[in-house]
Image (cartoon, rainbow, N blue to C red):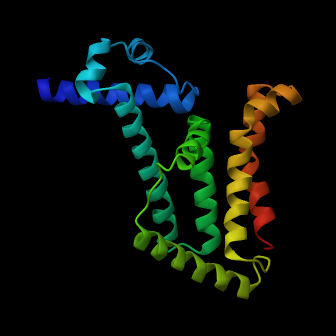
Amino acid sequence: MSKQSKDIETEELIRKTAKRLFFGEGKFNATTQEIADAAGVNRTLINYYFRSRDNLFSQIFEDAVKREEKLREKVLFSDLPFKEKIEMYIDDSLLQAKEYPYLETYLVSRINDGSFYKEQEEWEKFMQRFYEEFENEMKKGTIEEMEPIQFILNIGSLVTFPVAIRPLFQSTLRISDEEYDRLMSERKEIIMKILFKK
């Protein structure tokens, strides 16, 4: 293996390990030493590839934001019927939530400190397409009459809240990991019944 290939492989290993610690285990304060130990590399390599822990964290955060944007755009701009687009979005969101249960919590914290940014023109194009399709669905009678933003809030709440609040629910309701995973596996069907009339 060439040095360049090994560098790329090591950098990706550190990135994936940090992502697992931060977003999979909720260890937002993990040190460079903890990340290095978990990745099985020397701590100096983190500084070599990323300059600092904060820079590594920022890169992983930007990757997560880009992934969210790509998912929304892939789903919305596909040729699928509106209902199938929503199903696809829920499927992918729940799959990601299972792997990285603390990601949404972290994204919200970064939005609150002003670190979340999207090109206004791109966002307006995305929302215009959504509003058009949403209005057509209401005319067809497949969803209740409401403001489009209420529909978006419903999806966000129904998908994200059970993930973000999982530790509290499990603790107060005495629910095991296996049982909570089972409940989450049933979420899509329940959500679709709430969002769509038929």
Which of the pair 75/128 is nearer the observer?
128
Residue 38 visible to an observer of this rendering: yes
Which of the pair 157/188 is nearer the observer?
157
Which of the pair 75/80 is nearer the observer?
75
Q: Which quadrant would the C terminus be assigned to in this image?
A: bottom right
Residue 133: x and y in percent read 60, 80
Which residue occupies 74% across, 30% down? 167
Which residue occupies 40% across, 30% down? 16
Q: Is residue 129 above or below residue 111?
A: below
> Residue placed farthest to the front in the image?
113
Q: Is residue 111 above or below residue 143?
A: above
Q: Which quadrant would the N terminus be assigned to in this image?
A: top left
Residue 62: x and y in percent read 40, 45
Residue 69: x and y in percent read 46, 58
Q: Is residue 143 left or right of residue 118?
A: right
Which of the pair 47/184 is nearer the observer?
47
> Residue placed farthest to the bottom in the image?
139
Residue 78 visible to an observer of this rendering: no
Which residue occupies 64% across, 78% down? 134
Which residue occupies 70% across, 62% down? 153
The mark total stands at: 0
Residue 32: x and y in percent read 39, 18
> Residue placed farthest to the left in the image?
2
